[in-house]
Amino acid sequence: MPSVLPQPDRLALALQIKQRATDLGFNLVGIAPAGRSIYRDYFAQWLAGGKAGEMRYLHNRFDERTDVGQLLPGARSVVCVALNYHVPLMSAEPADVNERDEVRIARYALADDYHEIIKPRLYDLADFIREVVPDAQTKCGVDTAPIMEKELAARAGVGWIGKSTNLINPYIGSWLLLGEVITTLELPTDEPAVDRCGTCRRCIDACPTGAITAPYEMDARRCISYLTIEHRGEVADELAGKMDNWLYGCDICQDVCPWNSKAIDSDEPSLQPRFASGTLNASELLSWEPQTYYDTLRGSAMRRVKLPILKRNAEIVQSNIARPSGPSPGTPGEGHSNV
């Protein structure tokens, strides 16, 4: 059953929950009403159209994924949090290797696995809610759970879903790691975020593979992040030739977003990059043995991709570098001046 408190008590508790989230290190927090996703029909059509590619897990638990009340019966509120993962990167300064042989890694994957950073804090936040209201029920989730987390975060005022399909906050941009605590406790909710993309289409124009097929629409099968992480087979030549020098993930649509041009840096110690330049050397990676892979990527989200796929990606990058035009200009060390 929903946990009901008098209105003044609910307002006070909402403030306490938000303060607790801030004390736990989350940069943003908002509260959304629980309920069925307004994108339910669109999501069903998106899946039916094959745009999820090989991500079959997105087809599973559809009812729960599109309605948090199915995931936690009696759910009334969702506490949505976000952690800033934007970190400054140094220019690659190789001594004995060709700088053009450097392969890029998406910023979110440069540090320790963010799931292991966020989950304990969510559990702590959920414990706090249940300590204050013992009959309240809670359920936590990060992106591995069947939760439409970007939609919920937008409902909670954390940010808006941009044309790139990333969640964007006006102060942190789209460098956001999201988490949720679903609860049966009815809490006062925040105003939904307002879409501030305007007429801008830089993310759409910058995507080399055309994965952003229209404003707010993504064909995952063409996305470099999907191709380097989720896709297990051979990459079609037409797409491989447009993957630039990305080894794991892709930040192009974020690099060009005006809201990211003045993004503040994260001061979270566990999110600082293990590879200071945001790159690895392709030739060195291709020589890795399994033990090197395990040792180098221990505790990293990059372990989601096995060594053979990383080597496949490195070979694609080397092939792109060998072309007369080479990969697209720009290195992680150049920051976000291209806005």
Image (tube, helix red, strand yellow):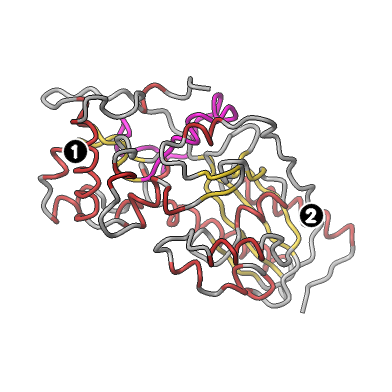
Quadrant assignment, res 185: bottom right
Q: Please tell me the numbered disc located at residue 189.
A: 2
Question: Which residue is rendered at x = 18% and y = 31% of the image?
Answer: 322
Horizontal side of 28 relative to 240 (left or right) equals: right
Question: Relative to 146, is 180 above or below?
Answer: above
Question: Which residue is rendered at x = 63% and y = 62% of the image?
Answer: 181
Given residues 166 and 236, the one toward you in this image is 236
Quadrant (top left/top right/bottom left/bottom right) for the N terminus: bottom right
Residue 332, horizontal then vertical, whole percent: 37, 28
Horizontal side of 94 relative to 269 (left or right) equals: left
Instruction: Indicate the amino acid at tag 1.
Output: Ala
Disc 1: CA contacts within 10 A as few (<14), some (14-19) or many (>=20) = many
Badge 2 element: loop
In magenta, the rendered stretch is 249-278
From the image, state whether disc 2 or disc 1 is nearer to you: 1
Q: Residue furthest right?
A: 7
Q: Which secondary structure is most common in the magenta stretch?
A: loop
Residue 277, horizontal then vertical, whole percent: 31, 30
Please count the marks in the image: 2
Horizontal side of 131 relative to 114 (left or right) equals: right
Residue 22, magenta (yes or no)? no
Residue 68, horizontal then vertical, whole percent: 66, 69
Question: Relative to 291, is 275 above or below?
Answer: above
Question: Relative to 125, is 18 above or below?
Answer: above
Residue 315, horizontal then vertical, whole percent: 19, 43
Residue 267, magenta (yes or no)? yes
Quadrant assignment, res 281: top left
N-term mark: 2 or 1: 2
Given residues 207 and 108, the one toward you in this image is 207
Q: Please tell me the numbered disc located at residue 282.
A: 1
